[in-house]
Amino acid sequence: MRFIIHEPSIQLKQGDENMMRKKGAVLAGLAAAMIAGTSVYADAAPASNKPIAVYLDGQQLQTEVQPLNVGGTVLVPMRGLFERQGAKLAWDNATKTLKATKEGTTLTYRIGEHTANLNGQALDVTVPGQISGGYSLVPLRFVSEALGSEVAWQPDAHTVRITSKVSLETSIRWGVNLRSKPDSASDATSLGMLAAGQKVHVIREVNALWLQVETENHQTGYISAKPKYTDYASVSLADMQADELIAYGKKFLGTPYEFGASPDQTKTFDCSSFVKRVYEDVLSVELPRVSYDQAKAGKEVSLSDLRKGDLLFFSARGLDIGHVGIYMGNNQILHTYSKELGVHVEAFDGQWKKRFVTARRIL
């Protein structure tokens, strides 16, 4: 079955401001609209040089280029529109195809085409998306309603207002500053402190150390992505954080080995002081001092499931667990145990496979 949506979506007559509210699941709501015969055509927009303002949950959406009004349909840059409404966006530049996912909803659309796919059902789009000024623009109402949001047009103010249904999926574990920029420098204004127990929605992963979030009162900003502050986790974030750990650890290549080295300095390391220092300096993760106790942190993973940043534990010095290293991926270990080599990279094979005891995932 094909559901047809004649996308205007921005109604330009004063009497057309009230729109249908979605009931139940997005797809069921769209089907109900078709069955009920509700018109979703918009009247053509009157010529106007006045720019269109877009507000999402009371905050103006800053777009890279001005929204376009094409025959009553407003087109806006795609990324901010999807991410601010809680959707994860994947973009294939070669085919100009986007895939947005939000909870149980998956929307796939190729820029320029008249058909989109929502949860396996074909949807016809009267006014297709387009590339303008180097940005991919998509129909605002079509996208927003597919994501479960409500859209209203205010003709006098030349304004679109979107009310999203944001899922607050992430809990604050430790009080953290909400900042105006993904930076702890002095020019990044603190917008307030988020207390432990509060919930936020993660809009996107900025990098290994910062998340862009939306609070329950629709305030947006940036918080630390370090594990101590929230329970947010993803494979992509863990991968970025592992890269940061490894890059930082490699700065100490050649640093001398000293058994029992103090973890409060970086002139010498033993295996566990090195691992402890790297995790603490990069991600504020406080691991125990010795390898035997570090092997109790995080969760156990199998060799077949190893990924960058995991800790590898080995028997040594007659102990069941007496050595630890950081897995770098590609069958490589970053560790230290030798006065001749100091901190170095070594293949995870031979004696290390024989002496391997367990692997633990911290991220």
Image: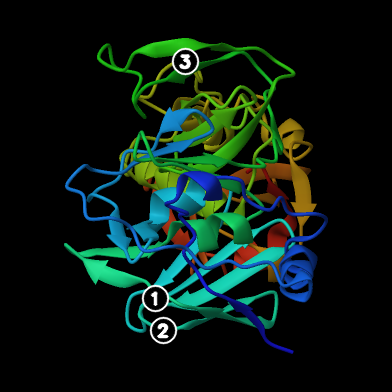
Residue under the point 41% across and 11% down: 190
Visual colour scheme? rainbow
- Quick one: label 1 or label 3, which is nearer the N terminus? 1
**First along the sequence among labels 3 and 2:** 2
Residue on which disc 2 sits: 113
Local SS, label 1: loop
Q: Are marks 1 and 2 in contact (CB under 8 Å)?
A: yes
Nearer the camera: disc 3 or disc 2: 2
Distance from Cα at disc 1 to Cα at disc 2: 6 Å
- In this view, the residue in front, 290 or 60, is 60
Judging from the image, what secondary structure is the residue with disc 2 in?
Answer: loop
Label 3: element kind: loop
Q: Quadrant of residue 275?
A: top right
Mark 3, other Cα within 10 Å: few <14 / some 14–19 / many ≥20: few
Residue 135 appearing in the image: yes
Marks 3/2: CA distance?
Answer: 60 Å
Q: Is residue 335 visible?
A: no
- Badge 1 amino acid: Pro
Q: Which residue is found at the position 37% from the left and 22% from the top?
A: 180
Q: Report the disc number at residue 23.
A: none
Q: Quadrant of the N terminus?
A: bottom right
Residue nearest the observer in this picture, 53 or 86: 53
The mark lying in front, picked from 1 and 3, is 1
The residue that disc 3 covers is: 264
**Residue type at the position of mark 2:** Glu
Say which residue label 1 marks.
Answer: 128
- Residue 2 position (above or below residue 341): below
Residue 132 position, x and y percent, is: 21, 65
How crowded pointer 2 is (Cα within 10 Å; few <14, some 14-19, many 20+) is rated as some
Farthest residue, direction front: 15
| Residue at x 73%, y 62% (from the top left corner) | 26
